[in-house]
Image: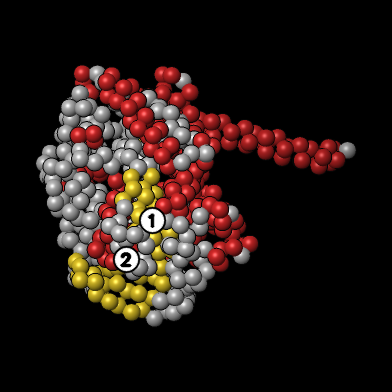
C-alpha cells in the first residue's frame, strides 16, 4: 500500500511543480511588462508636451468617401482641410510656439504657404503636347507629394501626365495620422488612378511610382487590379525604397500606446514628439501610424503569396525597384524574399545601392551593418535582373553597376561615371528620390533660400546639446548622389 501511495502521488507532485513554475513564469512576465511600461511612462513624461498640431485632427476623407469621390471633390476637400488647420492650429499658437522653426507659424521662414508652391498638396503636371502616357506618384509615411516632385517632373518632360496625390492624414498636421488607416491610403490610390485614366485612357501606358509606404500601396493596387480590371491595372511599377517589410517593433507599437487611454499619458500615443521645422514632412510620429504601416506590409505579403498560389502573379506588370542596402526603415531581406523571389519572369529589375566600401569605418560599424550580399542573395538563377551599384574596388570611390541578367549567373560590370562622395558611407531610406541639388534635402542645393531651411546641406561640427533635435536627424543622408543613374534607369522603362 505504501508503495502504491508513493507511486500514485508522483503525478500529483509533478503537476504541483508544473503549476508552481507556471505561476512563477506568469508573475515574471507581469513584472517585466510592468517594468517596461513604467520605463515607457517615465520616458513619455520627460519629453516635450503635446502641441496643437499633435492634438488637432482634421477630418480627412475615409476609404468609403474616397471611393465615391472625384479628383475635383478631393481637391476641394483638401482646400478646406488646410483652411481648418490655419484656423485651429496656426491662429491658436501660444507665444512660445511663434518661432522661426515652426512650420505652423505664419511668420516663420518655413511656413509652406509663403512658398511659390505648397508641395504638401496634391498636384498634376501636364506635358507640353498631347500626353503619351500617365504616371501616378504615391509618397511615403509622414511625407507629402514633395518627395516625388523631381520624378514627376521627369515624367512630364517625356510627355506623361504626372498625378501626385496627398495621402489622407498627411501634409496638414501630425495629428492627422492618429486616425488615418491604410485602407484610406489604398482608396486614395484608387482615386488617383481613376483620375489618371480619365485624363489618359488606355491603351496609353499607366505607371505607378511609389516611394516607401507609397511603394507598398502601388504594389497592393497592382495586385488588387489582377482580380478587378475596373480598378485600372498599371503597365509598369516603379518602386523606391518600397515598404514590403518593416522592423518587428511596429508589431508591438500598439502596446506602446496603451497608456494613452489615460488623459495624463496622452503622449504615449506618440513614438516621437519633435519640433515641426520641416515644411513638407512630419517630424513627430504617432504609434497609430506605425501600426497601420505594419498592417499594410503584412496584408501585402499575404496578398503576394496568395496571388502566386493562384497563378495570378504571372499577370503582374514588370517591377523596377531602387533600394539602399543599408536601410533603417525597410527590410532588405523582406523585399528580396517576400517579393522578388516570387515574381514571374516578366522583365522585372532590382537595383541595390551598396554602402561605400572605400570608407575606413569598418571598426565603427555595428555588428551586421557591413551587409554581405552573398549571405542574402542566393547564387542560383533568378527571374529578374539584379543590379548592384557598388565601388569598383574597396579602395576606389568610382562606382560600377554589377549586372546579373535574368536566368543567368554571369556578372557584367559597367562603370556608371559617378563616385561615392568621400563623406558618405551609405545611402539611406529617405535619400533615393532626391537629387543632390534639391533645395530642401540636397547636399548641394541650387536655391538654399527657397524653403527657408536646407536640411541636406547641413554639415556642422561643434559641441553637443545645442540643437532641439537629435543629431541623427541632421546626419542622415537626405539626397542621392546616384540620382542621375536612378533617373536614367527609370527613363529606360518609360515607353515613348
Label 2: which secondary element: helix
Q: Report which quarter residue 468 is drawn in.
A: top left
Residue 357 screen position, x and y as percent:
25, 65
Looking at this view, name the residue that lies furthest to the left.
462
> Which badge, 2 or 1, comes first in the chain's sequence?
1
Q: Report which quarter residue 152 is drawn in.
A: bottom left
Count of marks overlaid on the render: 2
- Residue 491: mark: 2
**Res 51 seen here:** no
Q: CA distance from mark 2 to mark 1?
A: 13 Å
- Residue 302: mark: none
Q: Camera-side residue: 43 or 327? A: 327
Q: Report which quarter residue 405 is drawn in.
A: bottom left
Q: Camera-side residue: 495 or 478? A: 495
Q: Camera-side residue: 462 or 401? A: 401
Residue 476 screen position, x and y as percent:
25, 48
Residue 101 screen position, x and y as percent:
19, 32
Q: Is residue 158 left or right of residue 406?
A: left
| Mark 1 neighbour class, 10 Å CA radius: few under 14, some 14 to 19, many 20 or more | many
Label 1: which secondary element: strand
Identify the image's colour scheme: rainbow, by chain, secondary structure or one colour: secondary structure
Looking at this view, name the residue that lies furthest to the right.
1
Task: Name the residue located 46 percent from the left edge and 32 percent from the top edge.
Answer: 179
Quarter of the figure that contains the N terminus: top right
Task: Name the residue located 22 percent from the left edge and 30 percent from the top edge.
Answer: 102
**Res 291 seen here:** yes
Disc 1 marks which residue? Answer: 135
| Mark 2 neighbour class, 10 Å CA radius: few under 14, some 14 to 19, many 20 or more | some
Q: Is residue 369 left or right of residue 205?
A: left
Task: Name the residue located 24 percent from the left edge and 18 percent from the top edge.
Answer: 94
Amino acid at each position: 500500500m505504501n508503495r502504491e501511495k508513493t507511486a500514485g502521488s508522483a503525478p500529483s507532485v509533478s503537476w504541483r511543480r508544473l503549476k508552481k513554475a507556471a505561476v512563477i513564469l506568469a508573475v515574471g512576465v507581469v513584472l517585466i511588462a510592468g517594468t517596461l511600461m513604467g520605463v515607457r511612462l517615465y520616458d513619455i513624461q520627460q519629453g516635450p508636451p503635446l502641441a496643437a498640431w499633435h492634438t488637432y485632427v482634421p477630418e480627412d476623407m475615409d476609404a468609403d468617401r474616397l471611393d465615391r469621390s472625384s479628383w475635383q471633390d478631393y481637391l476641394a476637400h483638401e482646400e478646406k482641410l488646410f483652411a481648418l488647420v490655419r484656423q485651429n492650429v496656426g491662429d491658436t499658437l501660444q507665444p512660445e510656439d511663434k518661432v522661426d522653426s515652426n512650420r505652423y507659424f505664419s511668420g516663420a521662414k518655413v511656413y509652406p504657404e509663403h512658398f511659390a508652391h505648397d508641395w504638401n498638396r496634391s498636384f498634376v503636371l501636364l506635358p507640353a503636347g498631347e500626353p503619351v502616357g500617365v504616371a501616378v506618384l504615391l509618397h511615403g509615411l509622414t511625407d507629402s507629394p514633395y518627395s516625388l516632385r523631381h520624378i514627376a517632373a521627369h515624367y512630364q518632360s517625356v510627355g506623361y501626365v504626372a498625378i501626385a496625390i496627398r495621402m489622407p492624414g498627411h501634409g496638414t498636421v501630425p495629428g492627422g495620422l492618429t486616425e488615418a488607416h491604410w485602407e484610406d491610403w489604398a482608396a486614395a490610390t484608387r482615386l488617383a488612378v481613376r483620375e489618371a485614366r480619365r485624363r489618359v485612357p488606355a491603351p496609353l501606358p499607366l505607371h505607378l511610382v511609389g516611394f516607401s509606404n507609397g511603394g507598398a500601396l502601388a504594389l497592393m493596387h497592382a495586385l488588387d487590379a489582377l482580380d478587378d480590371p475596373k480598378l485600372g491595372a498599371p503597365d509598369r511599377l516603379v518602386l523606391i525604397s518600397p515598404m514590403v517589410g518593416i522592423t518587428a517593433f511596429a508589431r508591438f507599437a500598439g502596446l506602446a500606446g496603451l497608456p494613452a487611454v489615460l488623459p495624463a499619458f496622452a503622449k504615449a500615443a506618440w513614438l516621437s514628439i519633435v519640433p515641426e521645422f520641416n515644411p513638407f514632412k512630419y517630424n513627430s510620429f504617432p504609434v497609430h501610424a506605425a501600426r497601420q504601416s505594419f498592417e499594410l506590409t503584412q496584408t501585402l505579403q499575404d496578398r503576394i503569396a496568395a496571388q502566386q498560389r493562384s497563378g495570378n502573379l504571372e499577370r503582374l506588370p514588370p517591377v523596377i525597384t531602387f533600394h539602399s542596402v543599408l536601410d533603417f526603415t525597410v527590410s532588405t531581406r523582406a523585399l528580396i524574399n517576400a517579393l522578388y523571389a516570387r515574381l514571374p519572369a516578366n522583365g522585372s529589375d532590382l537595383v541595390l545601392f551598396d554602402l561605400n566600401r572605400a570608407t575606413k569605418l569598418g571598426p565603427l560599424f555595428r555588428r551586421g551593418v557591413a551587409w554581405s550580399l552573398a549571405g542574402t542573395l542566393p547564387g542560383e538563377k533568378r527571374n529578374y535582373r539584379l543590379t548592384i551599384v557598388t565601388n569598383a574596388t574597396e579602395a576606389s570611390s568610382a562606382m560600377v553597376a554589377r549586372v546579373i541578367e535574368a536566368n543567368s549567373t554571369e556578372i557584367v560590370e559597367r562603370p556608371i561615371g559617378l563616385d561615392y562622395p568621400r563623406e558618405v558611407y551609405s545611402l539611406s531610406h529617405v535619400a533615393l528620390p532626391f537629387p543632390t541639388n534639391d533645395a530642401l534635402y540636397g547636399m548641394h542645393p541650387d536655391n538654399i533660400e527657397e524653403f527657408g531651411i536646407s536640411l541636406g546641406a547641413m554639415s556642422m561640427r561643434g559641441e553637443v546639446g545645442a540643437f532641439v533635435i537629435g543629431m541623427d536627424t541632421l546626419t542622415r543622408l537626405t539626397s542621392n548622389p546616384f540620382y542621375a543613374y536612378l533617373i536614367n534607369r527609370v527613363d529606360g522603362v518609360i515607353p515613348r
